[in-house]
Image (tube, rainbow, N blue to C red):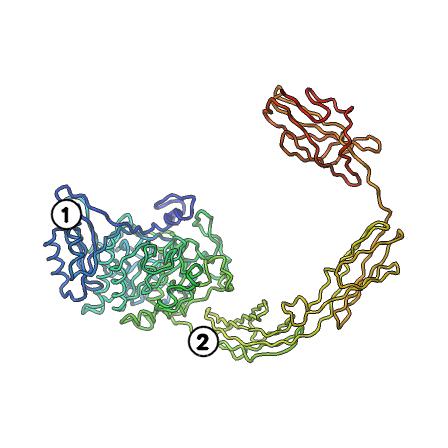
Amino acid sequence: MHRLQSANPFQSLSELGKMKNKRRWLIETLEQRVVLDAAGPIDDRHGPAMESVIVTFAPEVANPNAVAKGLVKAHGGQLGHVYENALKGFSAQLPQAARDALARNPRIERVEADLVMQAFAQVTPTGIDRIDADVSLLANIDNVDDRVDVNIAIIDSGIDTSHPDLNVAGGTHFYTVTSGRRQNRGSFQDNNVNDDNGHGTHVAGTAAALDNNIGVVGVAPGANLYGVKVLDASGSGYLSDIIKGIDWVTSTRTDPDPTNDIHVANMSLGGQGVSQAYHQAITNSVSAGVVYVVASGNEYRDILGTDFQFGTFDDTIPAAYPEVAAISAIADTDGMPGGHGPSTQYADYFGNYADDEFADFSNFSNDQGAPNYSSWYDSNNVVDSPGLGIDLMLPGVDIYSTYKDGGYALSSGTSMAAPHAAGLAALYIAANGPAEDAAGVYAIRQAMIDGGKAWTSAEGLQLPSPPTPNPDSPDNHVENLGWAEGGVPNELPIADAGISQSGFEDSAIVFDASASYDPDGGSLTFVWDFGDGQTAQTTSPTISHIYLHGGSFSVSLTVTDDRGGQANDSISANVAEVNDAPVANAGGPYQGYIDAPISFDASASVDFDNVDGTTTNDQELTYTWDFGDGVVVTTTDATVDHSYATIDSFNVSLSINDGFTDSAIAVTSVVVDQEQLETAMYVSSIDFESRRRGRDWRSVVQIRSAQDDSVLAGVTVTVIFAGETFQGTTDSNGLFRTGWIRNLGSETHFADVTDLALANYAWDPLSLDTEEDNGGLLGFPDGTLDLN
């Protein structure tokens, strides 16, 4: 369910979808999924059908505005937006013949169908506390309205321009009309950026709500917000409008006025598909110095789709573009690490989310199914992230923020996670200055990634242990948790595992990482992997470890600082074999009968040299049994049989030798009794009972002792009646009744006893006392029921 809640928890602001009983549909309603469907032909009763298209000029076209007007006039159609900054080209409504002609024009690079898109959905903010924006020196959150002087564009459904908790500095509105009278169709621009959906206002508040002692506060309080309205009241809009919004953002970096330069652009929208024009527009805008932060999407799928290839129709765009900072979501309910907060209010088909849990509606970047486990981002990403194509994860469940009409609302989705990162980018820019080109943008993104916290148990999150996947993540490429920390990036620690070590098995070997340090002066934790399947975590740089067998082991060290930064080092440990004395286990206690073989079992005995994972020091064992009756046997088999000639109790001892050392003696006991003869039992009768005027039948079996003809209770009886198998135990009258068989046909049916079981009794299947079988209504002594 798409969920928005007002400040009044008892009043729902809107309900935009119905919960489905399958994950795919559930998530699509959560996110108001961007629908990448071609706009399709436009009905024109006075001429040929028109199609909405996006046209990209070849690089040599110098005057896009004039050329676009000339081409549309020549071919017939309706000119839409003209792109001159992020892209050279235009949008238009054209007949198919015109589209085909433009595709052959050498001045045209490509013609694409325009697409209808919608916003991803929303959530609430303990997130500001969770990423420490509330203690950031740059954010300076203290209920005093000091403002972060950075310009953030919200490319979305607009912003509530009169909201008392937002600093809206300007913006623009792009929209396209494809229906109605032909003279009213086209693409338009005006200054009405006011939000009639609520999505854009919610996003804006998370990024930059004022620190004014009312409502909420954003990550970068009071930053200058520019509403780039490209989505309508339903949260949908044309891709051509979104590209024009990107074009407008880019123009602020190329015009002569530096005060309106957009430094960060948030796009909490997206969908599956391919658009080269879209990608080119964002790439060129990034080259102008704009940091683009986008939602990864809410379908719990790889942003490259199931084929793990970039540029195919199952990509999530723009999240898949390496030029943008894609953001995934976690759930946080108390603003603190540790996983101690309550569960979320938001719930999907699988229930609520626990505190500090990866939001499994969130898209991700995975290499587990990719060819050779190699991600496209390994060689094509412009930053280095543990999350591959995802830069950071940030709070995205139950996020409380500003809303349209001066209100506040609670909402969930990666749309709500992304503006946290936009605010972090603004804080970094406030401290270090804006980017001037793509390299500067990528440096800002890398600083945010490096300044984040790793996915660790200290944050209340499962610590992945490759190659075992994290239970809350589809793979181990878990992006860092975005972190404010005064806006200063974390300098990674230095890991030094010391020198390689040598020693003997079963003796402690000391490892020393005291040369490791944190350049920022923070505390360190040390995680050792000793190469024998054992690991240890400590805050002390030194640790001892005992190897159970010899060999050469690769020892790895991971050092983590108090901000989640990590570094690794490795050494070797050479361990010499030492002979281990075997450990005897005689099993038992045993019991048996006079003159009958009793099996003694020493297989639980162990020689650690034989089970240490190596064959270097394996030895053949000999077993010496003293049966307590004067007989001693030595064998190489772990089991041996022995018979006793007298009735008594005996102490039995076992020792083992591995060719070098005898084990300690293991002692057990055996009790030898006179063999107990079993009493025979037999089936004394097989009868039948009916109900419903002879339509339903069951079989009744009685069991007796052959010794005194007494009835036997507790006998486990197995009966096949009319082809069905029944099993149960006899009652105090020695009777067992099968289940009823309904509507038994008019033919001959049989009841056969196939097994009887009772301790100290043996079944004589040839005994059947026919005198005791009254045959029932139509029964016969041999277990036959004739219904003919």
| 43 versus 784 height, above or below | below
Secondary structure category for the residue under label 2: loop
Residue drawn where x is 44% and y is 49% of the image: 347
- Dot 1 corresponds to which residue? 184
Is residue 680 found left or right of 202 in the rendered image?
A: right
Work out whether residue 17 or residue 89 is closer to the camera in this orientation and state it. 89
Secondary structure category for the residue under label 1: helix
Is residue 608 found left or right of 286 in the rendered image?
A: right
Earlier-in-chain disc, 2 versus 1? 1
Is residue 624 found left or right of 784 in the rendered image?
A: right
Q: Quadrant of residue 79?
A: bottom left
- Dot 2 corresponds to which residue? 520
Q: Position of residue 743 (x, y in %)?
A: 58, 24
Q: Position of residue 95 (x, y in %)?
A: 16, 49
Residue drawn where x is 73% and y is 62% of the image: 605
Please state which of the two labelled residues, at mark 2 or mark 1, is closer to the viewer: 1
Which dot marks residue 161?
none
Mark 2 surroundings: few (<14), some (14-19) or many (≥20) residues within 10 A: few
Q: Position of residue 212 (x, y in %)?
A: 34, 61
Identify which amino acid the numbered label 2 is placed on. Asp
Q: Position of residue 377 (x, y in %)?
A: 37, 65
Is residue 255 found left or right of 748 in the rendered image?
A: left
CA gap between label 2 and label 1 equals 62 Å
Residue drawn where x is 34% and y is 53% of the image: 120
